Image (tube, coloured by chain):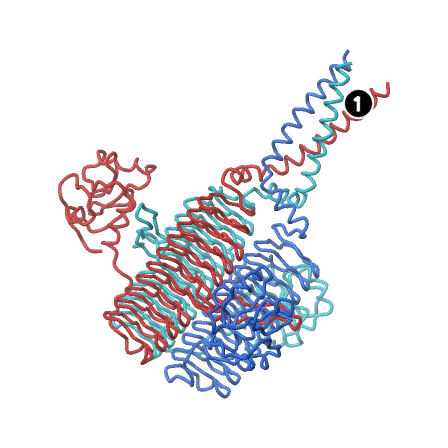
Chain colours: A red, B blue, C cyan
Amino acid sequence: MPTFQLSHLARELGLVLKGGDLVVSGLNTLEEAGPRDLSFLANPKYARFLGSTKAAAVIVDAEHAKEVERALISEYPYRDFGRALALFARGEGAFSGISPLAFIHPEARLGDDCTVYPFVFIGQRAELGAGCTVFPGVYIGEDCLLGPRCVLYPNAVLMSAVKLGKECVIQPGAVLGAEGFGFTRTENGIQKIPQAGSVTLGDRVEIGANSAVDRGVLGPSRVGDDSKLDNLVQVGHNVSMGRRNLVVALTGIAGSVSIGDGNTFAGQAGISGHIRVGDNTVIGPRSGVAHDVPDNFQGGGSPLMDKMTFLRHLSLTPKLGELYKSVKRLEREVKELRNAGKSSAAL
Amino acid sequence: MPTFQLSHLARELGLVLKGGDLVVSGLNTLEEAGPRDLSFLANPKYARFLGSTKAAAVIVDAEHAKEVERALISEYPYRDFGRALALFARGEGAFSGISPLAFIHPEARLGDDCTVYPFVFIGQRAELGAGCTVFPGVYIGEDCLLGPRCVLYPNAVLMSAVKLGKECVIQPGAVLGAEGFGFTRTENGIQKIPQAGSVTLGDRVEIGANSAVDRGVLGPSRVGDDSKLDNLVQVGHNVSMGRRNLVVALTGIAGSVSIGDGNTFAGQAGISGHIRVGDNTVIGPRSGVAHDVPDNFQGGGSPLMDKMTFLRHLSLTPKLGELYKSVKRLEREVKELRNAGKSSAAL
Amino acid sequence: MPTFQLSHLARELGLVLKGGDLVVSGLNTLEEAGPRDLSFLANPKYARFLGSTKAAAVIVDAEHAKEVERALISEYPYRDFGRALALFARGEGAFSGISPLAFIHPEARLGDDCTVYPFVFIGQRAELGAGCTVFPGVYIGEDCLLGPRCVLYPNAVLMSAVKLGKECVIQPGAVLGAEGFGFTRTENGIQKIPQAGSVTLGDRVEIGANSAVDRGVLGPSRVGDDSKLDNLVQVGHNVSMGRRNLVVALTGIAGSVSIGDGNTFAGQAGISGHIRVGDNTVIGPRSGVAHDVPDNFQGGGSPLMDKMTFLRHLSLTPKLGELYKSVKRLEREVKELRNAGKSSAAL
């Protein structure tokens, strides 16, 4: 990691330096930081470590800054920890230039300052914007169109005509534009419906390791600006997803789903085909979403329940046995009462 | 996309052309089709667009054909839309021939008209049928045996001795024949059980992007003719799956499961090890299947319930809180009644 | 497969040979073994095949050895079947040496007797221990450190600075050290938190096909000695997992989870972020684990329930409709009783 003056970091990040200047050479947690490390307090539950940390300085809010000798005072310490980390973190990969061991079709076009590692395949008429980095084993099919400064990590696959906006990141092994699950049962067996569309990503979209976004049947499947997909996520054909969505690992989004902006899908959620999810929803882990979801909805479960109903459901689920016993006992007691009633009526 | 005379398409697909002949150059939905596009009506809920579509002609059933000027009349419009799309759709990949940048073992054998891209590895004694296409980054282990016209998309992996029937399609990143999860806990820790079998696919089998089918312990894991696996599906060692099964994304099938013909497993379902699923079942999304399933079963849930019970369960799940309150109230009321009974008996 | 004298196998495995010596050339199940195959009885439910098997000899416990002519008598027949299989099973891959078609950075260091296939990328300062095997399409980033005798199957990816102990096995397409899901929502949209850590595996760790273990934010994500991950498993950033854990396919472990030793997670389980799982637990398939789990816990479900509660829950789940009807009937009956009580009180 490089080294920085605290005063330099304060200027770069627009923060206020409290205490004397010093050189720092790394970033670490309050507990593990050494005397040349910068640290941070993002979660108040770790404030108890402020007294004992060995860190040279701490990125911290104004209130907690009193508790340390040297601080970079921030309104959003976690955000600014992230920004500091971006200064310290080394990029992956030391290679630069265009490897002679890559296969680049003579009709492909590469912008300035692209890096192409060995064993990359770039097909006919593909175009890469300036400053793209393509790691080993990546496949870029014909007619793909990449904006500037995209990073494609090892063994990522872009089938033909996939479009990426600027600064997209495709993690290792992710597959964009594979033929979707287009099959229909007929009296003669299963017939394949060819998929003639592709995949279009907006700007700054990230796709996680070994995730898959299928091509559309006719037009593109879409993932909008700043949406981020975690690892092992499946997105079916014809899905249209807006901006600033976060989709956590192992979630499956079936074909032709329409998703607005600003949503969060927690891990292992499943979204059924052809439904519509609005904006700014939060869908809990392992949810099964089978119907349209309105804007600002928060909830979880399978079937999907609003947050209050879901939390109640979670707390009652382990009590189902008790509930069953209560009902059985009530049935006995009511029967006795009814029998007693009949006896007394008969008197 | 190429262009076609409607009369040519009618002949090719065995359909009846209503209205004058015309050239079409694309396929699109009723809403988005332009005056040179062919369109289709597969789902009656879109029939309302027949009046306003700009499409040159529509693939449609006899009843709805009255509503448009030009039609290709079909008994199965969705199937025939798929067949038309196959005529329009361009194959993936412009490369042909055997790349000198591939590694092909001298003892491997390739049939006529195979296409082998750069950076492909084909091992000793592997045999490829005529007309196979192998995309960049594919690994074909020694002793693999591929039928004619198989397509292996980028970075697919076939470990040694995997067998494919004819016209199989392996999507990008799919892995056939990895060592399964063969471990046993012993008093000395965890011992590996080596897996000596392989994987055998029938004809026209498709395996989705980043899916995995593990090799058998002794014999092969099998997937029968015309079965189609979606993306990110896991099939464990020794699984035997019959014909015409559809397995949707993120489903996991544990080791030694036996599956008949014509089944549909919806997304994120899980099938426990060593059970038997019959023929023609439909298992809903996110189901947990822990016991044998008879022929023609339809259902869902975890535990697996028949369709009626499952639908009832889905509708009652959000009412568990109410149910609990009702039982608490009943308990109070019954207690009062019992006390009242005792009092009156005591009179 | 090679051939062995039974007496040789008995010596190698430390078993007692009952019956005359013989050459065997394969291993198979009791039902499918031929007269030159060795077989085994691991599960007593197959003991009925001992009378009719054609196997040359059977690995079997002392009690069942009486029922066959020739046996290798074992206290742990399944373990010893595994050990025998390891003698019979051929390793994957016939290639040896360092392929001139691999890209190996001049500052990388390879131990003795490594095998490097074509189309492998090994980055700057990476070090491989003696006897490692690296299959085609593997990416080993700069500063990676591999212990002796690791096997990296085709298209596995190790991002920079990943560390493997000795004898680790990385199945095809697995990704170690991808950037985790480090994003935070701010008022200006989603900001990326760079991930500067890496991944450290202990000795004899196995990672399944197309699984992913993300790098830590600052330090390494860890998987301890002898832990085994199945296919399509997701392990988030900063996870710390101990020794001898088994994690079955499609399980997701969120960021910063801490896991002890000797645990078993069945398929499609999900573990929420920042929780702690103790030692020697068994978590059932499709469980949703949202809170800390104590040592020796056994259970399942979502929310996670102890085994007895979970089994009761499983058996009652399909009866929810009945339960609901019972409560509705009780409400009617209790209302009648209350009305009857009021009437009689009014008399």
Q: Is residue B222 visible?
A: no
Q: Is residue C8 above or below residue A22?
A: below
Q: Residue furthest top?
A: B347
Find residue C24 and report its horizontal and vertical position in percent. 61, 76
Residue count near mark 1 (Cα–Cα under 10 Å), binned few <14, some 14–19, many ≥20:
some
Amino acid at dot 1: Gly
In terms of depth relative to the viewer, which is nearer, A167 or C214? A167
- Where does the C terminus of chain B fall, quadrant-wise? top right
Location of residue B255 by image quarter: bottom right
In terms of depth relative to the viewer, which is nearer, C284 or A80? A80
Find residue B48 and report its horizontal and vertical position in percent. 56, 60
Location of residue C23 by image quarter: bottom right
Q: Residue furthest left?
A: A20
Q: Which residue is mark 1?
A: A341
Report the number of discs.
1
Find residue B302 and report its horizontal and vertical position in percent. 60, 50
In terms of depth relative to the viewer, which is nearer, B5 or B224? B5
- Compared across the picture, whether B110 is left or right of A320 comes to left
In terms of depth relative to the viewer, which is nearer, A5 or B106? A5
Find residue B7 and report its horizontal and vertical position in percent. 56, 81
- Where does the N terminus of chain B fall, quadrant-wise? bottom left
- Compared across the picture, whether B188 is left or right of B241 comes to left
What is the chain identity of the residue bearing mark 1?
A: A
Location of residue C73 by image quarter: bottom right
Q: Is residue A175 visible?
A: yes
Q: Is residue B4 above or below residue A346?
A: below
Residue at (80%, 26%) from the top-left corner? A339
Q: Residue furthest right?
A: A347
- Compared across the picture, whether C282 is left or right of C339 comes to left
Q: Is residue B337 above or below residue B45?
A: above
Q: Please tell me whether mark 1 sits on a helix, a strand or a loop.
A: helix
